[in-house]
Amino acid sequence: MGNQTDDNSRPGEFELIARHFAPLAGSAGAFGLRDDAALLDVTPGSRLVVTQDAVAAGVHFFADDPPELIARKALRVNLSDLAAKGAKPTGFSLALGLWDGWDESWIARFASGLGEDCAQFGITLTGGDTFRSPGGLVISITAFGEITDGNYASRLGATAGDVLFVTGTIGDAALGLKVRLGELTPGEPAADLLRSAYWLPNPPVSFAPLIARHASASMDISDGFVGDLRKLAVASGVGFAIDAADVPLSPAVKALCAEEPKLLTMALTGGDDYQFLFTLPQSRVALVLEEAQKCGVHISRLATASASAGKVMLVGTDGTPLLFSGESWNHY
């Protein structure tokens, strides 16, 4: 693809890639981003795991959000998918659709954010594409990981009697969006913590080896706790009945829900959590609780899977089932 800009003050595609993205291409098989494809190495005895997620301005983030955080969010939502399967992330490719008014300083900050997470997660850029996107900024990332053959944790493996867990806390990013929009005005430091959760997901990538070794089923929570829980239940052919009080909430979310109980629905269905829902055989529970503590990931026990295929129920403090008009974020 050739130079796509009519603005002579901006670099063309190849110069842009050489300046800002080639430094992120650390593997020999990426050829410094100077070829049309890349070679991916896979450890003998392992399988390649691939995922792809796209994010767009005005849908998944605000166009005026910090470029570094936009880049890191776009990457992390993909790393979350890999780690929830038990895979170790190894690299990614990037398709970047730039709006008409972009400038090089924005690109430099965007690439800097990618570089920060490449270093943090030990991954490299393997290739990609840039293109003009008149409708606004679009970022599509394809991420690669590897997993020991036989250790892939799909949504389909839970059986009746398995124990359901979730990592981290739920609802911070959903309420963080409300703070970002000015629809919620908690004091500090709660407002900053919630905004940060919206801007920059923190999937527990270090937990992936435990998922690989022990989970019977696993998925990340991107579209909302309730809706994604139902996806897991349907895929595995099991059911879950959960006390809503057992769903882990941060102190900031708890305080806001105590002031305005309707916010609990937003917390449970709003999405952008990028935590992991997973099931364990009863025999693995004690071991995983111990190992999770060692790796610094908080996990919460929620329920025992039943044979009621696809049935999900959350029960309120008064003992009655909670009703949701929508269980998850709607992509369309």
Image (spheres, helix red, strand yellow):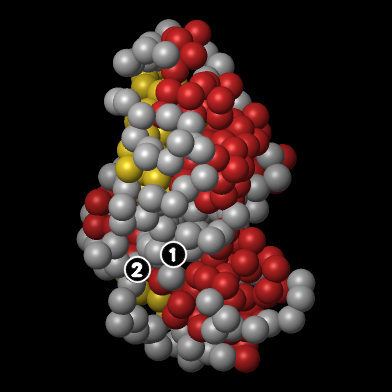
Which residue occupies 54% across, 84% down?
183
Quarter holding residue 19: top right
Could you tell me residue 205's position as x and y percent?
56, 39
Could you tell me residue 81's position as x and y percent?
42, 42
Q: Is residue 3 above or below residue 194?
A: above
Which residue occupies 52% across, 71% down?
177
Q: Nearer the viewer, residue 133 or 305?
A: 133
Instruction: Say how many tags the image has.
Output: 2
Alpha-carbon neighbours of circle 2 within 10 Å: few (<14), some, or many (≥20)? many
Q: Nearer the viewer, residue 283 or 79?
A: 79
Kind of residue indicated by mark 2: Ser
Q: Nearer the viewer, residue 102 or 212?
A: 102
Which residue occupies 69% across, 66% down?
193
Could you tell me residue 191's position as x and y percent?
68, 74
Res 281 seen here:
no
Residue designated by label 1: 271
Residue 148, label in figure: none
Q: CA distance from mark 1 to mark 2?
A: 7 Å
Residue 328, label in figure: 2
Q: Is residue 41 above or below residue 119?
A: above
Could you tell me residue 330's position as x and y percent?
29, 67
Q: Earlier in the sequence, mark 1 or mark 2?
A: 1
Res 201 seen here:
yes
Q: Is residue 54 left or right of residue 71?
A: left
- Name the secondary structure under disc 1: loop
Alpha-carbon neighbours of circle 1 within 10 Å: few (<14), some, or many (≥20)? many
Quick check: marks 1 and 2 in contact, CB under 8 Å? yes
Which image quadrant: the C terminus? bottom left
